[in-house]
Image (cartoon, rainbow, N blue to C red):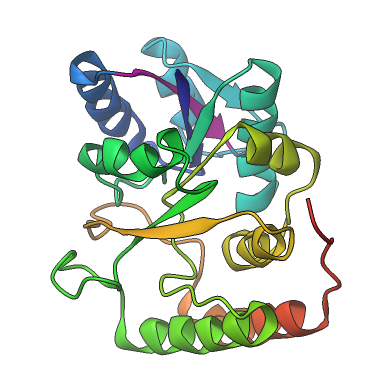
Amino acid sequence: MKILLIVPSYNEEKNVLNNYNKILKYSKNCKYSVDAIIIDDGSIDETKSICIQNKIPHISLINNLGIGGAVQTGYKYAYENDYDIAIQFDGDGQHDVNYIEKIINPIIEKKCDMTIGSRFIDKNSSEFKSSFFRRIGINIISFFIKLKTGFKIYDTTSGFRAVNKEIIKEFALDYPSEYPEPISSVSIIKKHFKIMEIPVSMNERKTGTSSIKNWKKAYYMLNVILSIVFTKFGGKK
């Protein structure tokens, strides 16, 4: 069982080494073979240099592609290197490596094709749940996903996700460049893959800044909703 952590990172010089060391420590004690690849998304700080100096496996993109392009690069790498499971794992330190087995076990047991690490299906699972206004936005997006698919996803913007080999191929070939988490989830549901949400705890970002600025949040939510409602998604797998 080959498992890959895809770690998109943009200007994460303060997080990248610590994040990778946590992954490395976890993988030594995990019963599965867990690799990691840092996707340096055209960073203009020292992210790339730190990866080189510390021999951290990485792919450095020439230009900043955004989260969708960076993550798809990781899926292409996973597909080309024949990984069985790929896990998206944020480069800002918000995700906890100790939940990796919890989110991959349902896939290994063939209970589903994709899992989403969720802060919201168990009220006690995570102390950090993002800002009040962002949670409102997540709930609104959740409503429209259910309207479109009939399936409710609670943590619609969670970037802590795991997928099986079949979806690795799907995402390597076609992955949304904008609003990737909610849009790709809708696409997967419409293709009749099975998704499960798994309660996890997440950490608040301690250094660096989020790619979604305050002034962008309303714009982001509106465009996600329009994309969900009006995009024609592919049919049955």
Examine the structure image and report whether residue 68 is included in the region drawn in magenta.
no
Task: Determine whether, in the image, residue 214 is placed left or right of residue 95.
Answer: right
Residue 38 forms part of the magenta stretch: yes
Q: Which residues are magenta?
A: 32-40
Q: Is residue 233 left or right of residue 154?
A: right
Relative vertical location of residue 206 with respect to residue 51 in this rendering, above or below: below
Residue sitting at x 36%, y 47%: 92
Q: Is residue 20 rendered to the left or right of residue 45?
A: left
Image x and y of residue 21, in percent: 25, 23
Identified at 29% across, 67% down, the residue is: 119
* Nearest to the observer: residue 54 or residue 172: 172
**Foreground residue among 36 and 9:** 36
Residue at 52% from the left image edge and 33% from the top image edge: 86
Which quadrant: the N terminus? Answer: top left
Task: Name the one closer to the observer, 105 or 7.
Answer: 105
Q: How many marks?
A: 0
Q: Compared to 220, does 69 lie above or below?
A: above
Question: What main secondary structure does the magenta stretch of the protein show?
Answer: strand
The percent coordinates of residue 141 (x first, y second) are: 55, 83
Counting from the top left corner in percent of width and height, residue 116 is at 43, 56
Q: Is residue 37 left or right of residue 96?
A: right
> What percent of the width, then of the height, locates residue 204?
24, 60
Say whether residue 221 is visible: no
